């Protein structure tokens, strides 16, 4: 199984222009890979300014223009894609990751941990941490600032994710170090698709990265240019949770001693 991160700059407030910017890179990715991962809010851009502007730009997931474009490509090539989108449901807006396959939309994840002013624009996620079996591998999704919450990564590993797709608009420079460690301690693959460019005072850090279950970076992108990075996924490696012949990342846990974490 080959995957690819698609790094680009969505166009703030202009989903049609964002889709036009993304599609050539998605085509490049899916000509060589089975699954492409795009950044967070890849349709609208990030700094939407006000709740009203976010509501006006957001679209229901089944009519989202980026989801539609990805579904057409995935259908014609028999591939999968994950992309961050601005999702409207009624009068609420969610920072969502959509999973698309050859038959169209397969599932979604709504960001649980909202960063800074996102709290003014989005409702916090309410769909938990689903894992989707796409055939050759099981996929979980997290979005950007979710990197700071190891509990979420652990839940996905416990529910059998082989690969955690991580659409991002990262601004803090050390997030890439954390995702290498999440990959290592959960023994999963992690694909962080970050954006580039700036919006106002926010400078996005690029450097998209695919991490392996040994915590090493398998592929990466530059900090400031559109780029597609490819890596091969060996699902058997993600399903072998042993650190040593006598130590297993999941089985050695002591949840009876971790009760503090529930509160
Ligand atoms: C972020 O969560 N977009 C930093």
Image (spheres, grey):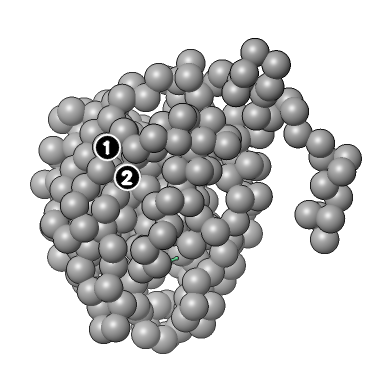
Front position in the image: 95 or 226: 226
Q: Is mark 2 within 8 Å of ligand 1?
A: no
Q: Is residue 20 above or below residue 90?
A: above
Task: Report which quarter residue 197 is drawn in.
Answer: bottom left
Q: Which residue is mark 2?
A: 209
Task: Report which quarter residue 112 is drawn in.
Answer: bottom right
Tell me whether circle 1 and circle 2 mark residues in contact (CB < 8 Å). Answer: yes
The answer to whether residue 219 shows anywhere in this view is yes
- Left/right placement of residue 256 relative to residue 176 reads right
Judged from the image, the secondary structure of the residue bearing numbered disc 1 is strand
Q: Is residue 215 above or below residue 166?
A: above
Q: For the point 34% across and 38% down, which residue is it? A: 217
Q: For the point 49% across and 66% down, which residue is it? A: 94
- Label located before the other in sequence (1 or 2): 2
Q: Position of residue 125 (x, y in %)?
A: 58, 61
Q: For the point 70% across and 16% down, which residue is it? A: 246
- Left/right placement of residue 252 relative to residue 171 reads right
Q: For the point 40% across and 19% down, which residue is it? A: 234
Judged from the image, the secondary structure of the residue bearing numbered disc 2 is strand
Task: Report which quarter residue 11 is drawn in.
Answer: bottom left
Name the quadrant of the C terminus: bottom right
Ligand 1 lies in quarter: bottom left
Q: Which residue is mark 1?
A: 219
């Amino acid at each position: 199984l080959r995957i690819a991160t698609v790094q680009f700059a969505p166009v703030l407030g202009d989903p049609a222009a964002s889709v036009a910017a993304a599609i050539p890179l998605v085509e490049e990715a899916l000509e060589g890979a089975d699954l492409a991962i795009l950044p967070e809010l890849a349709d609208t851009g990030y700094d939407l300014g006000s709740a009203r502007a976010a509501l006006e730009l957001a679209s229901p997931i089944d009519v989202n223009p980026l989801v539609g474009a990805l579904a057409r490509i995935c259908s014609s090539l028999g591939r999968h894609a994950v992309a961050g989108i601005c999702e409207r449901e009624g009068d609420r807006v969610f920072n969502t990751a959509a999973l698309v396959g050859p038959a169209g939309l397969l599932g979604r994840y709504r960001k649980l941990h909202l960063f800074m002013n996102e709290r003014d624009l989005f409702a916090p996620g309410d769909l938990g941490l689903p894992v989707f079996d796409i055939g050759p591998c099981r996929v979980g999704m997290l979005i950007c600032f979710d990197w700071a919450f190891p509990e979420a990564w652990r839940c996905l590993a416990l529910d059998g994710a082989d690969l955690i797709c991580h659409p991002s608009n990262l601004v803090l420079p050390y997030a890439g170090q954390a995702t290498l460690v999440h990959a290592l301690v959960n023994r999963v693959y992690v694909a962080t698709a970050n954006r580039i460019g700036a919006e106002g005072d926010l400078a996005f850090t690029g450097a998209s990265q695919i991490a392996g279950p040994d915590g090493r970076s398998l592929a990466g992108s530059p900090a400031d240019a559109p780029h597609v990075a490819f890596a091969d996924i060996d699902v058997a490696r993600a399903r072998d949770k042993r650190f040593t012949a006598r130590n297993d990342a999941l089985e050695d846990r002591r949840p009876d001693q971790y009760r503090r974490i529930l509160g």
